[in-house]
Each structure stands twice: as C-alpha cells, then as structure tokens.
Image (cartoon, rainbow, N blue to C red):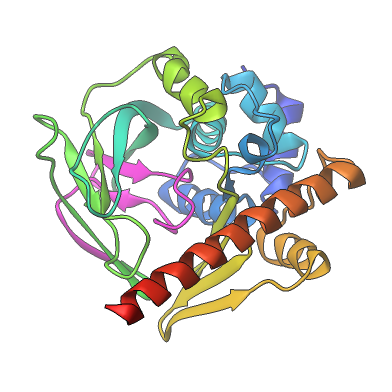
Amino acid sequence: MITDAEIKAYLTRLGIFDSKAPTKAFLFELHQAHVERISWQTVDIFAGKPTAMDVRSSIQLILSRRSGYCFHLNGAFGTLLQALGYKVQWHRAGVQPIGQEPRINGFHLGITVSLANDEGQEERWIVDVGLGDMPYEPIPLRYGTYRQGPFSYSLMVSGAAQGGWRLTHDPANSYVGIDYAPEVVDTLDVFAANHEFYSRSPESPWRDLFIVRQRSAKRIHEVKGRIWKSWDEAGIHTTEIASKAQWREVLADLFHEELVHYSELERDGIWNKITRLHERWLREMQEQNYRAGSI
C-alpha cells in the first residue's frame, strides 16, 4: 500500500531523515512532526477540486506537498505507521460542535496504536493528526486529564457508544470534543459516503468555508476566511488578513501551505471567493450589531 520510496519521502516531508524502530518515542516524534508540518484544511473542497480519500490518493496528497482533512490525514498517517511496524486500528468517530450533542456518525476517522510498555504489557494510544487543533502528541487510552503545552484534554467514557471513549477539547477552542467507537474498521470504504457529502454536497459545511489549522507545542494557528487566530497560554489573538500577499505569506510560513496544486489564476479565484464571503460576513455582523443596538 506504501512503497519504501514513499515511506522515505513521507518521512522527509515530516523533517525526519532516518527511520527508527516502532517505539513510543518514535511515535511521539512522528505525531508531533505531522501536526506541525501538515495542516488540517478544507482548501480543495472550498476551491471546488476535492480529492479522493482512498489511502493511495491520500498518500500521494501528502507526498505532493499538499494536505486535506481527517480522512486524508489519518488515513495516510495510519498507513505510514503500519509500514513502520506499528499495530494500528482505525475507528469510526464523531466531532461534537459547540451547541450540539455528542455523536459517532463516521464523519471523523480515529486511530489507536497498540504498543508494549516497559513491562511487556500492551498499551493503547489515541493517535490523531486529523483534527488540526487538538492533540500535539499521542494520548494514552486511559481515562484522565492530559496537559499538552497550554491546553488540557480529558479522556472519559463515551455516552455515544457502549465501550467507546470521549476526548474533550480544551474549553478555549473551537468544538466540544470527539467520541470514538470501540470497534475496529478494516477499510476506509465505510467513510466514503461521508467524504462524498463533505466534498460535493451543496449542504457541506466546507464548500464555502476556507479553513487551515496547525498545531505546535505551544499554540494553535487557524485561518478561517480572512480571519487569522492564534491560541496560546496568553489567550486568543485575532488578526484580519488585509491582502492576498499577506494571506499567501501566512499560509506558507505558518502552515507550510503554498497552494502548489493551483495556478496563479486559480489562487486569485480562491482569494476572491474568500473576500466575497468575508465582506458578506462583515455586513451581516454590522446588521446584527445595528439591530442589537436598536432594541
């Protein structure tokens, strides 16, 4: 499913130039490098050029200096880990937006990895490079609270699936949490209909929402339309991107996203669509503020 040459190229994209034994330390190194260097994003869907989510397509996406969202990122990363000798399991999962109920609807692909500890006992780890603004490194599949940089995550029993588990997001961030089903799935085909919805349905939330997210040890960066946000120990910092040049610079410098799949004309089209939607959003905010002030 992935060749030796592709493994080497994938590791090089992560800034890792020597393969190592499948240890806990190497798993952490791989996970940290992946979330730092390969962003979670809706770029291709927003631009009207969605990418297939089968493993081969997802691996080629990574190797061609591009990116995607959970199905691409966790699908490719899980395949890399398997090729490196890790015991990998895929799971159906579901993200809980703010104001909505927990769910396991298969709109997220989850990963667990089993490793032998120092006593030779098998331990399971939650590995997830497909969320963009959540774990910086693997989280043990043991209930409790885990601190990663300035952010805290809690792992608990899921109320959405018997035997499942729930990882709650840090309260400062963009959604409430994520629930994972305990059953292992052997193929990504079970996610195909949901990927088709996200990629092509007129009701997809990503068709008109340009988002790029990246996690580092101490902060989270997000560009949503023309709003650039950073979360760190000092709080949330928000900047309105003023120009296409600044937008391109932020994407390249912070997110390693140079839009290599797009011609200059297509990049202009993406920026113009972002700007139209941003201006509409500003008008809506002004109208809401006016109505609130007139009450």
Q: Is residue 232 visible?
A: yes
Q: Residue at x 30, y 49 (%)?
A: 97
First to last magenta residue range: 118-146
The image quarter in which residue 126 lies: top left
The image quarter in which residue 293 lies: bottom left
The answer to whether 166 is drawn above or below residue 183 in the figure is below
Does residue 239 show up magenta in the picture?
Answer: no
From the viewer's side, name the closer residue of 220 and 184: 220
From the viewer's side, name the closer residue of 200 and 192: 200
The answer to whether 119 is drawn above or below residue 81 in the figure is below
The answer to whether 70 is drawn above or below residue 56 in the figure is below
Apparent side of residue 184 relative to residue 46 in the rendered image (left or right): left
Q: Residue at x 51, y 20 (%)?
A: 196
Q: Residue furthest bottom?
A: 234
Q: Residue furthest front?
A: 294
The N terminus lies in which quarter of the figure? Answer: top right
The C terminus lies in which quarter of the figure? Answer: bottom left
Q: Main secondary structure of the magenta part?
A: loop
Does residue 143 show up magenta in the picture?
Answer: yes
Apparent side of residue 63 relative to residue 159 in the rendered image (left or right): right
Q: Residue at x 90, y 44 (%)?
A: 265
From the viewer's side, name the closer residue of 84 and 174: 174
Residue 90 at what x, y percent from top left? 37, 26
The answer to whether 66 is drawn above or below residue 59 in the figure is below
Q: Is residue 7 visible?
A: no
Residue 280 at what x, y percent from top left? 58, 58
Residue 55 at what x, y percent from top left? 58, 21
Residue 266 at what x, y percent from top left? 84, 42
Q: How many marks?
A: 0
